[in-house]
Amino acid sequence: MHITTPDHTGRSNAATTEPVIRLHPQDDVVIARQQLVSGMRVASEQLIVRGLIPAGHKLAVRRIEEGAPVRRYGQIIGFASKAIEPGEHVHVHNLAMGGFSRAHEVGVDARDMAPAAQPASFMGIVRPDGRVATRNYIGILTSVNCSATAARAIADHFRRDIRPEALAGFPHVDGVVALTHGLGCAVDAGGEGLALLRRTLGGYARHPNFAAVLIVGLGCETNQIDGLLASQELQGGARLRTLVIQESGGTARTVAAGIEQVKALLPEANQATRQPVPASHLMVGLQCGGSDGYSGITANPALGRAVDLLVQHGGTAILSETPEIYGAEHLLTRRAAQPAVAEKLMARIRWWEAHCARTGADLNNNPSAGNKAGGLTTILEKSLGAVAKGGTSNLVNVVEYAQPVTAHGLVFMDTPGYDPVSATGQVAGGANLICFTTGRGSAYGCAPAPSLKLSTNTALWQRQQDDIDLNCGGIIDGAESVDTVGQRLFALMLEVASGTATKSELHGYGQNEFVPWQLGTIT
């Protein structure tokens, strides 16, 4: 199988039925479309396979000397740790990281994207301040881990699967969810860790997908509710209420009071109705988890195509996971709308390099074990596939974790690569939909924002359809193009934003996946 790639994102439009995929004319490797066995002939590359090559893994197309760079997507993904013969498996046993310079040609690929001729729309919920929601929840947030049990008990009282009568009269309310965490105390009151937690909680408290929010605290924690509200310029009122366990008389009384608070909020929340709104109100967080050797060929570039369509319609996409664009950041700086945007991105890359040096960590501890089993060898290879989620649109801004995203277009948010932490930051920044690609399989949701999951290969789709919303494996199978799948995905985004439930929502995912980024010393 041969795939034509006019750019470095793995975008493809042509496919045959060869057993391997070539991504770029200069590549030293091709990708196995199926498991290859020793002695198999690959006619398109004039190769004889040496040994067993799992599906999604790489095999050399020429002899590669020890120490020589190895290219995929036309980009360096590592260096041969020993000589590699044509037809041999290229993976962790013979490919390693190495230092090399990358040209950061700022803005050379930036281009004006013509707006869509016919603006798309979805059925959104317009809040009184003009912001648009894709869901209508009541949220229970906590200032500290100590109030998590009380918050969950309040939300559990309204669970439709346990007490369907609790919300029987409120069909326009999607649910009551408790988003708890393990932080909030034993931290420096003026430090970065507490500031980051407060920024995250503030973003959720004002998120349009919450009709109203109740914040529950213990009372003696470092993250005092009054301090949280003041730092985030939030004011208590009809939409934002608070409870403190030590002031309410203990757990049972707090839970009872919280239930009454929610009951009082439900009638107003139920007044929300959907109406047609422009797609420009859609803000999509881009995630990839459980990636494999196909991620940068199918689901990620298909998501990138959908992102380009979203941007053409005036919407916003948030690319994140800084450790997972490491080594591919030069492809993003080429698309920076302004030099200052490129510098912001490089500043975050330098922060991560220094952070890992201070903590004795290695940015190449990613790919994970599952990523490697799926065919990814180095973080460079993973990153080159991961950036494809951002399509080809200009990079218009770079923000820090959980900061509000106000620009329209492609925005980068600095986050860790761990998906729940990363997506939590995106939602705090305003994302009202998450798109999550996976090659190994994922069980993930992200209340209050619905999460669409996309499989990179048909085998995963067949194995885990209960968790996957769209199969992108037809690109590998030769049945569909990246452009076709991207257009289908964009249409699906609008459907989900209009209220269609995702697989993760049907399973009840979302509450346990709220994981703020923990920085700073716990004392």
Image: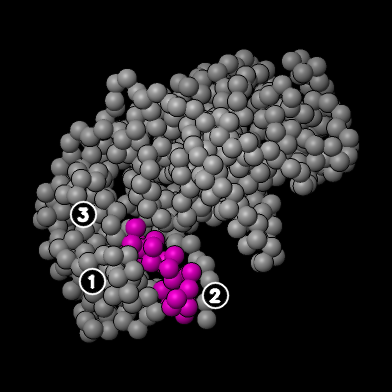
Q: Is residue 276 above or below residue 18?
A: below
- Magenta segment range? 176-203
Residue contact between numbered discs 3 and 2, judged by CB atoms under 8 Å: no
Residue at 44% x, 71% y: name it: 194
Give residue 362's position: percent from left, percent from top. 69, 57
CA gap, disc 1 and disc 3 = 15 Å
Answer whether residue 192 is magenta in the image: yes
Residue at 37% x, 80% y: name it: 221
Give residue 86's position: percent from left, percent from top. 84, 27
Residue on which disc 1 sits: 242
Residue type, numbered disc 1? Thr
Which type of secondary structure does the marked residue at label 1 adopt? strand
Q: Which numbered disc, 1 or 2, marks the residue that appears first in the sequence?
A: 1
User: In this rendering, which labeled residue sits more in front, label 3 or label 2?
Assistant: 2
- Give 324 or 358, whichever is nearer the viewer: 358
Question: Residue 211 — which label?
Answer: 3
Which type of secondary structure does the marked residue at label 2 adopt? loop
Residue on which disc 2 sits: 521
Residue at 50% x, 39% y: name it: 338
Answer whether residue 354 is magenta in the image: no
CA gap, disc 3 and disc 2 = 34 Å
Q: Is residue 369 above or below residue 515?
A: above
